[in-house]
Image: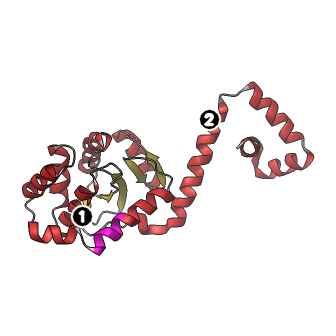
């Protein structure tokens, strides 16, 4: 990490060509080390920038897959040209807190598609995630999603109640919830989250940016706007 920070600061201050010349002479490393000793507060910022760059490189390498929802697991405009992706867990209080922020974005922009990626990382969440995808298959994802968060932490009782509130065909929902297609979707979401370096929910892909944790409307809106510019 120390070697990277030295090289990165040289690159930022001098440009990559200048960094190569400084590295060749050895002067760059010495002067940059002196700068870092005098200004240690810059190190966390540089480390964060490096990690963000690495994650965004991985996002670019994933192609469009992360933007493609499980059929029906969308809120907002399913045909919208702008996409926000949310990795979510029904036991996550910050996921619940983010719902009004996302709803505000949807209300403001009729061209916004919000792709929900079920990522059950809390104990007891997988059954709820599976039922959510079964609801998506019936075209009732949004109703189940909101009911599940309204009714409280996942449990057999709250999942069944949310499914009833959403008006699911329960026999069909139970069959789909345990299907290979749903298992594959959950495995894919977990692999994507790992590839993007996510450590918890909610996590986001907004335009070309990856964001972890609860963020407000303005932070998400800014990221989406930068993707359009």
Residue pointed to by mark 1: 133
For marks 2 and 1, give the CA distance.
39 Å
* Rendered location of residue 151, percent (x, y): 14, 45
Question: Please, what secondary structure does the residue beneath circle 2 have?
Answer: helix
Residue pointed to by mark 2: 44
**Any part of residue 138 in sight:** no
Identify which residue is drawn at 44% across, 55% down.
207
Front residue (pair 222, 167): 167
Identify which residue is drawn at 26% across, 43% down.
96
Disc 1 crowd rating (10 Å Cα; few below 14, some 14-19, many 20+) is many
Identify which residue is drawn at 54% across, 55% down.
56
Residue extending farthest to the bottom is 180
Q: Horizontal placement of 218 versus 106: left or right?
A: right
Residue extending farthest to the right is 25
102 vs 131: above or below: above
- Would you say the residues marked 2 and 1 are in contact, meaning their CB atoms lie under 8 Å apart? no
192 vs 223: above or below: below
**Any part of residue 140 in sight:** yes
Figure quadrant of residue 139: bottom left
Segment tinted magenta in the rendering: 180-186
Q: Horizontal placement of 14 versus 114: left or right?
A: right
Whether residue 183 is in magenta: the answer is yes
* Rendered location of residue 146, percent (x, y): 18, 50
Mark 2 or 1: in front is 1
């Amino acid at each position: 990490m120390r070697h990277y920070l030295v090289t990165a600061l040289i690159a930022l201050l001098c440009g990559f060509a200048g960094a190569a010349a400084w590295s060749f002479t050895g002067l760059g490393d010495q002067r940059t080390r002196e700068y870092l000793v005098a200004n240690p507060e810059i190190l966390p910022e540089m480390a964060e920038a490096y990690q963000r760059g690495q994650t965004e490189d991985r996002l670019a390498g994933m192609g469009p897959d992360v933007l493609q929802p499980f059929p029906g697991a969308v809120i907002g405009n399913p045909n919208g040209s702008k996409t926000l992706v949310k990795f979510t867990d029904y036991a996550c209080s910050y996921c619940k807190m983010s719902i009004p922020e996302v709803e505000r974005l949807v209300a403001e922009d009729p061209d916004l598609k919000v792709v929900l990626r079920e990522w059950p990382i809390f104990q007891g969440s997988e059954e709820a995630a599976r039922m959510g995808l079964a609801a998506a298959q019936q075209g009732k994802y949004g109703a189940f999603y909101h009911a599940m968060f309204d009714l409280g932490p996942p449990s057999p009782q709250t999942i069944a109640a949310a499914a009833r509130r959403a008006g699911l065909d329960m026999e069909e929902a139970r069959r789909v919830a345990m299907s290979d297609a749903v298992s594959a979707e959950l495995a894919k979401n977990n692999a994507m989250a790992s590839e993007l370096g996510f450590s918890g929910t909610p996590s986001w892909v907004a335009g070309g940016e990856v964001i972890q944790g609860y963020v407000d409307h303005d932070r998400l809106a800014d990221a989406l706007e930068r993707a359009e510019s």
